[in-house]
Amino acid sequence: MPERDQTRINERIRVPEVRLIDDEGDQAGIMKIDDALQYAQERDLDLVEVAPEAKPPVCRVLDYSKYKYEQAQKVKAAKKGQQQITIREIKFRPKIAEHDYATKRGHVMRFLLHKDKVKVTIMFRGREVTHPEQGRMILERLAIELAPIGQIDQRPNLDGRNMTMILSPTKEVLGDEITEFEPEDLSAEELEERLAARVEGRRRAAPEPSEEAPAEVEVEVQAEAEPAADGDGEAGGAEEASSGDGEQAPAAAEEPAAG
């Protein structure tokens, strides 16, 4: 059922006086409601309340039917210009066969060219979840092969037994610069090279620790960044550095006393 128009016009405006804006868009001042109605009728136009909360309410003199039509056209044009993005989902298995991978990649490609976002899910079963790198490799491969038409919105993320990644259409697809696409069939060596380049690019883009930070703070940051280091590795180095500072402190304190 269409929403009822709540705008008050002409005799539906029941206030003693209004602030009038004439048909030229100029301020006509405050006048009695009867005078404002007569002003509009003399010009074969409508008196339309545009600011009912004002004191007194503001009314404009205009052709209300034409005004409503123009407003409806503006709303229609705004909706037409909006991009309706739908999220599709494609599911892979970590040990997917090559021809099945190619088929599902085609689905992802078709969705992206249709300007939809795609949620790519790797489903792990049983002990497969102990090897998440297999699923990550499939997602990274897909992102590399479809890079011209799909950009990563959400990097591969393991949640329970599912690993997900979200791809969205590139600006070239959204701007209709790319309407057709044929993915490259990369060899294992080419895929490994491009993957290494992506990892290196992300590493370089990561912020570096501040050079002005104290030595102890730098050692702690490194230890947190690489929690898998052996006990004899960087963590041990941090302990030695702390111990070394502790031994030198008393000697430094005694030196002035000796003088």
Image (cartoon, rainbow, N blue to C red):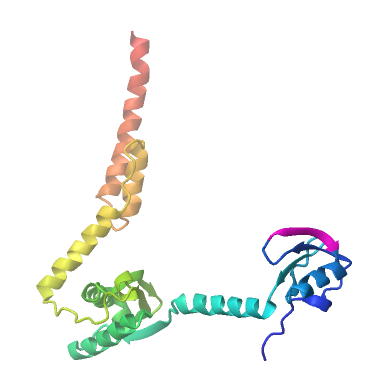
Residue 181: in sight, yes or no?
A: yes
Which residue ends up furthest to the front in the rendered image? 42
Q: Residue at x 34, y 10 (%)?
A: 258
- Residue 111 belongs to the span the image colors magenta: no
Q: Locate the N terminus and report the quarter of the image it occupies.
A: bottom right
Q: Is residue 38 left or right of residue 189?
A: right
Q: Is residue 249 above or below residue 32?
A: above
**Prevailing SS of the magenta stretch:** strand
Q: Residue at x 23, y 86 (%)?
A: 101
Quarter assignment of residue 113 = bottom left
Q: Nearer the viewer, residue 108 or 188?
A: 108
Picture coordinates of residue 223, whole percent (x, y): 32, 50
Q: Nearer the viewer, residue 93 or 243?
A: 93
Residue 124: in sight, yes or no?
A: no
Picture coordinates of residue 33, whole percent (x, y): 85, 68
Q: Nearer the viewer, residue 106 or 30?
A: 30
Q: Is residue 98 left or right of residue 152?
A: left
Question: In this picture, which residue range is highlighted in magenta?
Answer: 26-31
Q: Nearer the viewer, residue 153 or 191?
A: 153
Q: Is residue 55 left or right of residue 236?
A: right
Quarter assignment of residue 251 = top left
Picture coordinates of residue 97, whole percent (x, y): 20, 89
